Image: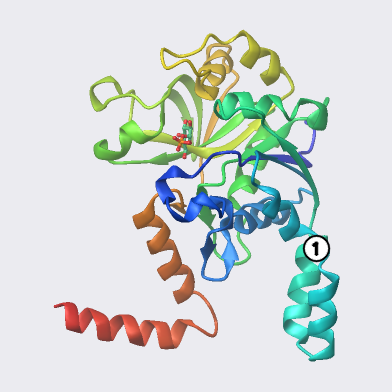
Amino acid sequence: MNKKITKAVIPAAGFGTRFLPVTKSVCKEMLPIVDKPTLLYIVEEAVAAGIRDILVITGRNKRILEDFFDYTPELDALLEREGKEEFLHLSRQIESMANLYFVRQKHPVGFADAVLYAEAFTGEDPFAILLGDDIIYTEPGAVSGIGQLMQCYEETGKPTVAVMPVSDEDVPKYANIAAKERDGNRCRIDRIVEKPSVREKFSNDAVIGRYIVEKDIYQIIRNTPPSPKGEVYFTDALQTLASQGRLMGCRFRGKRYDAGNKLEFLQANVEYALRDGALAEPFRAYLLELAEKLK
Ligand code: G1P
C-alpha cells in the first residue's frame, strides 16, 4: 500500500514582476480572482484533496500571506456584533481550514531551491507541490486537480506531474514531456525538458504546476547541475526520476488558468464571476451589453 499524501508545499517566494506596479507592495499571491486571493484557491484545492498540513515558502515582504490565514479577532467581533453571519463563517473557515506553516527562501534563486526549504517539513513522507500561478478549476463535487495526481501516485507508487496539451505557440512556456506508455489519462514519462523551443519539443504535452514527489527529490536536486542560466531546474531533477522509469504524467480533468499572466488572470476573473451565485446574472448581462457595444 502506498503512503497517503497529507502534506503540501506551495512555493510563493517570487517577486511577481509580471504584475508590476501592484507587486511593488502587494504580493502576487494576494491578487484576487473575484474576492479570493489566488493563494486561497491553491490552499482550497489541496484541502479538498484531504491535505491538512501546508508549507508556504515565502520571502521577504510576504508577511501578509501569514496574516491572511491567521485569527482575526477584531474583524470577527465586528462581524458578530453586526450579525454578518455569512462573513463570520467565511473568516472562521479560513482561519481553521488547514495547518499552515511558513518558511522564507533566503535568495530568490528559483523553484528547485525553494523546494529544498521543505525538507524538514516533509521528512519521510511523499508530498504534493502546488505552484501558485496555476489555478485549476474543477466542477463542484469533482476530484480537485492535485487530488487527481494523488490518485495516480497512490495507485502507481510513482511520483506524478500534471500534464496538459498546449499549442505550439505555448510549448516554450512550460516543461515538455516525451511518453510512450499511455494508459487512459496517465502516461509514463521518458523525457522531460524545461521550456524547449518548438523545434526541440518532444510533444505538445506541457507540465503545469502540480507535482507529487518523494523524499529522494531533495538529494536529486542537490545533485542536479545548474542550467546554463545558473539556476537548478526542478524539471532537470524530475528528468532523473524519468530516466529511472519512475515519473508519471496525469492529464487532469479541469480548466487551468495561468494567474501569473495578465490576460489569463483577467479571463479567470471573468469566468469565476460568471460562476458566482450572486454576481453571475448581473455580470453576464453587463458582458452581453458590452459585447454588443464592441461589435
Ligand atoms: C514553472 C516550471 C515549469 C512548468 C510551469 C507550469 O515555470 O518551471 O516547468 O511547466 O511552472 O506553470 P514558470 O511558469 O514559473 O516559469
Q: Is residue 160 left or right of residue 197?
A: right
User: In which quarter of the view is residue 97 placed?
Assistant: bottom right
Q: Quadrant of the C terminus?
A: bottom left
Q: Position of residue 4 (x, y in %)?
A: 79, 38
Q: Residue at x 74, y 73 (%)?
A: 90
- Asked whether the viewer can see residue 204, the reply is no
Considering the numbered disc 1 on the image, is that residue within a helix, a strand or a loop? helix
In this rendered view, identify the residue nearer to me: 166 or 184.
166
Q: Which residue is mark 1?
A: 95
Q: Position of residue 161 (x, y in %)?
A: 55, 33
Furthest residue toward left:
295
Is 218 placed above or below 71 here? Answer: above
Q: Position of residue 67 (x, y in %)?
A: 74, 57
Furthest residue toward bottom:
82
Q: Is residue 263 left or right of residue 72?
A: left
In this rendered view, identify the residue nearer to me: 214 or 292.
292
Q: Position of residue 17 (x, y in %)?
A: 44, 43
How many dots with numbers?
A: 1
- Asked whether the viewer can see residue 195, the reply is yes
The amino acid type of the residue labelled 1 equals Glu
